[in-house]
Amino acid sequence: MAETITFSQVKSGIGSTKKINATLVGLGLTKMNKKITRKDTPELRGMLNKVSHLVRIEEI
């Protein structure tokens, strides 16, 4: 498994539940098309799975 993972927000969180929006903020995704690189952990994978319909994983 790779050390880091890069992802970006491709759809807006407007209209989503509070939990989904809080997950986006927890991931650091505050704007559309913002790229984030983080250490690949099980916790991060779980958060990305929860908002998989709003984000694109670019590098695994």
Image (cartoon, rainbow, N blue to C red):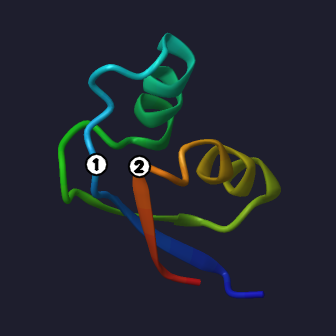
Q: Amino acid at mark 2?
A: Leu
Q: Secondary structure at mark 1?
A: loop
Residue 15 versus residue 29 in the image, above or below: above
Question: What kind of element bears circle 2?
Answer: loop
- Rendering coords of residue 33 (x, y %): 19, 59
Residue at x 53% of width, y 31% of height: 23
Left or right of 36, for residue 19:
right
Q: Which mark is residue 11?
A: 1
**Relative to residue 5, is residue 35 drawn left or right?**
left
Which quadrant is the N terminus positioned in?
Answer: bottom right
Q: Note whether 37 is above or below 49 in the view shown.
A: below
Mark pair 2, 1: CA separation? 5 Å
Where residue 20 appears, x then y in whole percent?
Answer: 51, 26
Residue 19 is labelled as none
The image quarter containing residue 19 is top right
**What residue is rendered at 55% in x and 74% in y?**
5
Q: Are marks 2 and 1 in contact (CB under 8 Å)?
A: yes
The numbered mark at residue 54 is 2
Q: Residue at x 75, y 60 (%)?
A: 41
Give the residue displayed 34% in from the left and 43% down from the top: 29
Quadrant of the image occupied by residue 14: top left
Q: Amino acid at mark 1?
A: Lys
Crowding near the residue tagged with mark 2, few <14, some 14–19, many ≥20 C-alpha atoms within 10 Å:
some
Location of the C terminus (image quadrant): bottom right
Q: Residues within 10 Å of mark 1 (few under 14, many from 20)?
A: few
